[in-house]
Amino acid sequence: MPRACPACLAENTATVAEALASGSFYRCGRCGLQYVEPVPTGVPVFLDFTDAGRIILSQIERGEPIGELLTPNERAMLRWVQRHLPEGAPVLELCCESGRFLAALRHAGFTPLGMDPLPRPIGMLEERGFLVHTGSVEDYPKDWPEPAAVVLLESLVRFPFPVTVLRGIRERFPRACLSLSVPSPRRSLKVPDFDRRVDYPPHHLTRWTPRAVVSALRNAGYRGTCRIVPIRLHWMRGAWMLRILKVLFAVYLRLTREADYSLLGYGTPA
């Protein structure tokens, strides 16, 4: 019998969605979340994006438009921050990885604060003047300002008990808003440079639906909403014929329900 759903916490409602070599992905009958059972050993697993971060931040330092370097979910997250927070507000990114979103926050006039479980990317970001620290919520430095918002980009899928992670954020920063993104399971395999077969253990332990995102936020103590962010095809670039082909491809992906990029969840303290 699988454990209770790690998003909506419903018990005894799951069925097997995909059998794996060790265990299975179960689908919750209430919120649609898919989750691995049994939980693999050695999780969560975090990737080191230090080298990628050096390249990206060097591009930004050379004057390349930062908006062109952001992923669709990062662009949507930045717009949310700009709409809801005053300029200069401190914003904490957990699992900040390459530091790309921290750079976008700084460029937009906010005070970026970054934390990551791995020390190597933190050292790289410190060299570039970012206020960063190794660890997670429980390691938040006492002399740092209280964040107005906490963001978590694409990393919630690494944790086997996501509500526990979100509750930790809610308890540590009771007045802060929360904005998170998770990869959409319907992100197309047909788009060049998109590798979507990484949604397996030990890196990805959950696959989300909008209802599951809202349920997890609610169970962590937030009033939550969720929206879908589509892929970005840069259809205005290139010759006219290429632009037309991109538009037709975009229509095809939408009709086949493969136009999603990420699910964005927004939470305000309940």
Image (cartoon, helix red, strand yellow):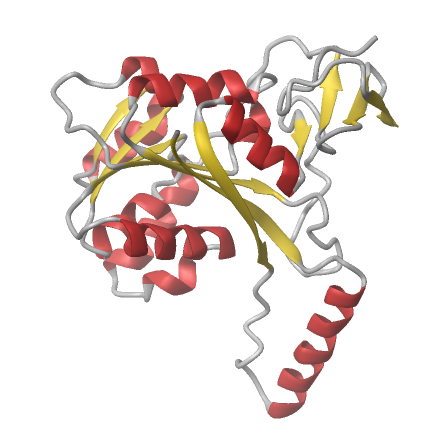
Q: Is residue 135 visible?
A: no
Q: Is residue 29 left or right of residue 128?
A: right
Q: Is residue 171 left or right of residue 215?
A: left
Q: Residue at x 70, y 13 (%)?
A: 4
Residue 141, given in percent of the width and then of the height, sits at 20, 18
Q: Nearer the viewer, residue 232 or 13?
A: 13
Q: Nearer the viewer, residue 123 or 161?
A: 161
Q: Is residue 262 left or right of residue 151?
A: right
The image quarter in which residue 91 lies: top left
Relative height, residue 122 to residue 140 (above, below):
below
Residue 71, given in percent of the width and then of the height, sits at 48, 55
Quadrant housing the C terminus: top left
Quadrant housing the N terminus: top right
The image quarter in which residue 40 lies: top right
Q: Residue at x 76, y 58 (%)?
A: 257
Relative height, residue 93 to residue 109 (above, below):
above
Q: Residue at x 26, y 24 (%)?
A: 133
Count of labels in the image: 0
Relative height, residue 31 to residue 43 (above, below):
below
Q: Residue at x 74, y 57 (%)?
A: 258
Query: Looking at the image, which residue sits at the far left?
Result: 143
Residue 237, given in percent of the width and then of the height, sits at 53, 80
Q: Nearer the viewer, residue 137 or 210?
A: 210
Residue 209, given in percent of the width and then of the height, sits at 67, 40
Query: Looking at the image, which residue sits at the far front?
Result: 270
Relative height, residue 217 to residue 190 (above, below):
above
Q: Is residue 69 visible?
A: yes
